[in-house]
Amino acid sequence: MPNEELMLDHEVALRKKKTNRIVAFSLLGLVLVIVVLIIVGACVPVNLKPYLIGSPDRVTIYNQTSTYGEFDADQQKYSQFMEEFDDVFEASFLVAMFSGRLGDYQITGQAENTLLSSVISNLQSGYYVEFKYDLPQTLTYNDGSAYNDIYNNNRTLSFTSLYFAISQTDELVDLEIYVGVKYSDDENASTYAVKVTQKANTYSLYENLSNYRTY
């Protein structure tokens, strides 16, 4: 009888040891999968460029209150600038996911009724850019759906210009893009600023500003 008990205890110990080994290997496998996902997420690039920013007809760069550079869509400087501009929205999948900006950008400020002229006045503390469009562009979310006028849900908002500052800091930050809109079809109506916020690093534009100088 004692021998039978010893054999039973031995089998239980072996079974427990085997179970512990399986659990340990499972946990190790799970950790390896997480590590691989983190590495892949940190390496895989995504582009967070807002859907609403189409190719402008003209680009103007300002240095405070002075025009620094200006070029049309058929000029070489335009192509160089737009290629570099697209790159400022590059981020790793992991950074984009944890910043909460992987799916969409933020659109705010309509209810504040901030005049576009006031925003431009604030931008004049450094370098900033204006995109100009010959035809009205529709203000949209990242999925292409229209951002409607809060004062008239049946009316979409359009714009022919947008503005953003060029940062002198080399880091991925919230880039504030100001879109000029009117809440009325009256040509004399005031133009207000709707703020679109997305993660970007515009430092490369600052580093290469001399390439775009035309004045």
Image: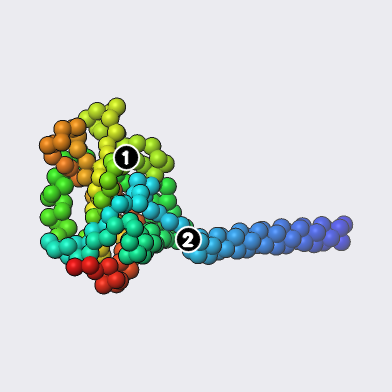
Q: Which mark, residue 138?
A: 1
Question: Which type of secondary structure does the marked residue at label 2 adopt?
Answer: strand
Residue located 22% across and 41% down the image: 181
Mark 2 crowdedness (10 Å alpha carbons): few <14, some 14-19, many ≥20: some
Q: Do the residues labelled 2 and 1 touch (CB within 8 Å)?
A: no
Mark 1 residue type: Thr
Residue located 26% across and 65% down the image: 167
Question: Which type of secondary structure does the marked residue at label 1 adopt?
Answer: strand
Horizontal placement of 67 versus 175: left or right? left
Q: Position of residue 189 (x, y in %)?
A: 13, 36
Mark 2 residue type: Pro
Question: Which residue position holds label 2?
Answer: 45
Residue located 16% across and 51% down the image: 119
Q: Where is residue 57 in the image (x, y as percent from the top left)?
A: 30, 52
Nearest the camera: 65 or 197?
65
- The quadrant in which the N terminus is found is bottom right
Q: Earlier in the sequence, mark 2 or mark 1?
A: 2
Farthest residue toward the front?
Answer: 74
- The quadrant in which the C terminus is found is bottom left
Horizontal placement of 99 versus 134: left or right? right
Q: Which mark, residue 5?
A: none
Picture quadrant where residue 24 is located: bottom right
Mark 1 crowdedness (10 Å alpha carbons): few <14, some 14-19, many ≥20: many
State the CA–CA distance, disc 2 to disc 1.
28 Å
Picture quadrant where residue 160 is located: top left
Residue located 13% across and 39% down the image: 190
Count the numbered circles shown: 2
